Image (spheres, grey):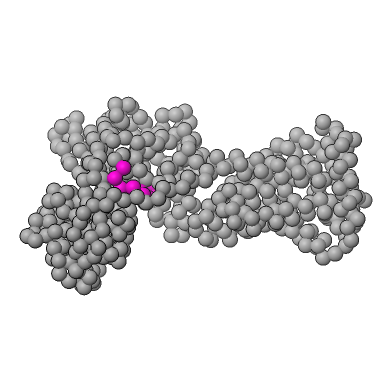
Amino acid sequence: MLSMLRWGPGRVARLDRAAVRAVSRWPEGPHDAVLKNLSEAATNGKLWFAIAGVCAAFPGKPRNSAIHGLLALGVASAVTNLGFKTLLPRTRPLPELLPAFRFVNPQPTSSSMPSGHSASAVAFTLGVALVNPRLGVFLAPVAAGVAYSRVHTGAHWPSDVVLGSAIGVGAALLTRKWWPVRPPVPATDRSPADAPAVGDGEGLSIAVNSLGGSYSPETATQLRDIFPKAHISMISEGDDVVAEIQAAARRPGTKALGVWGGDGTVGTAAAAAVEHDLPLLVLPGGTLNHFARDVDARSLEGALKAAKTGAAAWTDLGHVSAGRGVEGKDETAELIMLNTASIGVYPNLVRRRERLQPAMGKPLAGLVAGLRTFGAATPTTLLINGVRHKLWILYIGRGRYYPRDLAPLTRPVLDDGVLDIRMVTADEPFARLRLLWAVLTGTVGTSKVTHLSEAAEVSIEASGEPLVIAVDGEPLPGVRTAEFTVKRRALRVYSPLS
């Protein structure tokens, strides 16, 4: 087999020579310079890196497709140059087979079999197409031109190009497992709930936390302009947030409770709204406003639209019972969980990702944040539902989040009755290397160190030192035990999507 490939006595060599002779008979023209320049541009992947750089400037599919394409290109290049060129040594086409004006100069000295240019071109283009088909269709003629140029300029035999292209296809399909295309997010679904229309603010009592991340002196004025008949109470530094919100909920004539603040303040208001059987109007005033985003009240305009029409939906609430002190029996903290709770390095990962995201975009920021965080992380040991685990991250979401990996972003259904449990464990052999590799290749969601499950309740117990649990971004230190449960359809919340 090797001698056939090297010296050409077989059928493949005869077909190669016939194809090269046919190419040599083509008349000289502008296409010769175009193909020679295209071949040179693709040397060492320069062309594909340039295209990836342009795509990376646009967030979303273009940036993701560029990352996938480069990952596939890297695999194809390594397999071609470190594997096949060593296993299948073959001489390049002889100069006399093509016109001098067309022949590449200097001719490469490595094995002709297979074509590295073709492998890289096909791998990058197909890798891009798996994420962004439209961009892949645009790049396909360029990749085909690069592959053909290697025969046209005498750098490779046609069979070299065919094998290189096949390697490129295999590399792209292999990396699809490493960088899987995310399954579609289900359509938003809301269960309608009864709530009074409070568009002008009549019967609406609003608690405004002036310590919220986006508060300004104009906030109260703006709210009074939007809801002229509402009662607005300000919560200032030093005030008891729980007491102030409870007072707003108990105010005579109150038909709905409004809250302006971040997720922590909204969680406190949600508990008061449930206690007094009031619908909750969320006015986003924090830094991230996760819950407001999920109920589509991420702006005052969205909240006003729901308030005017009385559009509301049912939502579940998470309940956390945290035991603190010796064996978790000295003190019990009862908390409402609107969104998520986490143990381990997840809060650090999120903070790093959000700090880097404006400059890098979400995928690259997540990659860099993951490498930095897990590179220096120390696992935590604890019992989860009675089973001992050593882990880096325990993430518990109230409701099913998407995508199904370590970067949950959206929650299409608010009353599905489940806790979304995600663990990144350190129990497996070479767990840190596995994790770093998964972060590097974007496969944390499918790695063996990642475990995704759902349940209606979860219990945890510290093994050794007490835990710090972050509930909706607020740290709760000194926890020995904790029980997480779901309260089905416990809260009515104004939502323009209901």
Task: Give the residue drawn at x 47%, y 45%.
Answer: 183
Residue 33 pos. (x, y %): 80, 63
Specify the quadrant of the image occupied by residue 392.
top left
Residue 171 pos. (x, y %): 63, 42
Residue 260 among magenta residues: no
Task: Give the residue drawn at x 43%, y 60%.
Answer: 358
Task: Give the residue drawn at x 68%, y 50%.
Answer: 121
Q: How many marks?
A: 0
- Relative depth, front residue between 226 and 497: 497
Task: Give the residue drawn at x 20%, y 38%.
Answer: 321
Residue 8 pos. (x, y %): 88, 37
Q: Is residue 350 left or right of residue 78?
A: left
Specify the quadrant of the image occupied by residue 298.
bottom left
- Relative depth, front residue between 16 and 365: 16
Q: Is residue 288 above or below residue 429?
A: below
Which residues lie in the magenta part? 407-416
- Relative depth, front residue between 198 and 99: 198
